[in-house]
Image (cartoon, grey):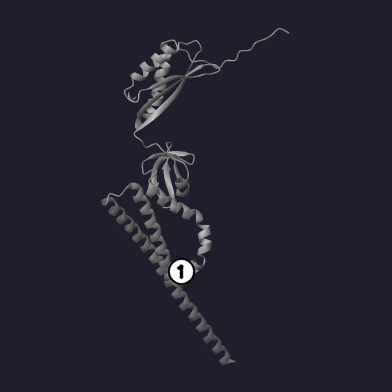
Amino acid sequence: MRILEIDSISRFAGVFEDILHEGTSLGFTIIKAAIIFLIGRLIIKLLNRLFRRLLDKRDIELSVRSFLVSTVNVLLVILLIVSIIGALGIETTSFAALLASAGVAIGMALSGNLSNFAGGLIILLFKPFKINDYISAQGTEGTVKEIQIFHTILNTPDNKLVYIPNGSLSSGVVTNYNVECRRIEWVFCVDYGTDYAKVKAVTEATLAEDSRIQVSPAPFIALNALADSSINVIVRVWVKTPDYWDVYYDTNQAIYKAYNLQGINFPFPQLTVHHGNT
């Protein structure tokens, strides 16, 4: 009986020793993986910083620079993940084989991101827009802040950051407002019976007072339509792109003031009802 007790105690001690050994080994493995993660993150930050400096020295275009920085960062993170997996004792070759065998499923799941990546390459190749351009796409307007590996970031006029997939941008309609000159168009409505020649003369004089409005091409003024309650006069001018909105709003104010001074009235919607005797 005494011998059985000693044997049981020795077995328990052996199991406890094995558990302690495995636990210690697992603990060191986790600590090693954590150290690799922390050092890896630090190295990635340093490499990204060095890569940005290298691109700055090469004077590479901002659009290409943003895309390359995003791509390099993704690749470095993938390498760090593989290193951590190896540190945990998982065979990286088996891990790679597992990813390869699941390639079809992953490809289907990431088909959208792959199209976005391809879209980013198309944007960099054909350059429909670049960093700091003001564009309109996918129902959103804003200044291009970054062109990343999968998305393009727009900064809207009300200071929102909008992430648009590159696939949509490369295959959809994009309006780029980053041109030297733009045309502004107004439609001013005046009362029926107003002398059109007077309206045109007052409009021309008002436009001539604004030096931001280009002389060539000359401003265009014409009687656009005989509407239900008004005569519609269309006005088109050309300005430098940075002056677009200032000229637009300032001209609205100037025309309103000039028409009032010259007795040119803006009509209200009217409906004439004829009442017949029954």
The residue sitting at the top extreme is 277
Question: Of all residues shown, which one is farthest toward the right?
Answer: 278
Residue at 44 percent across and 19 percent down: it is 222
Q: Amino acid at mark 1?
A: Ala
* Residue assigned mark 1: 96
Q: Quadrant of the N terminus?
A: bottom right
Nearest the eye: 9 or 110: 110
Residue at the image point whose x is 44% and y is 24% from the top: 186
Residue under the image location 50 percent in, 80 percent down: 16
40 in relation to 65, above or below: below
Q: Position of residue 169 (x, y in %)?
A: 45, 45
Whole-percent x, y for residue 30 in the image: 44, 69
Crowd around label 1: few <14 · some 14–19 · many ≥20 (10 Å): few
**Residue found 43% across the figure and 14% down from its top:** 199
Q: Secondary structure at mark 1?
A: helix
Residue 252 versus residue 23 in the image, above or below: above
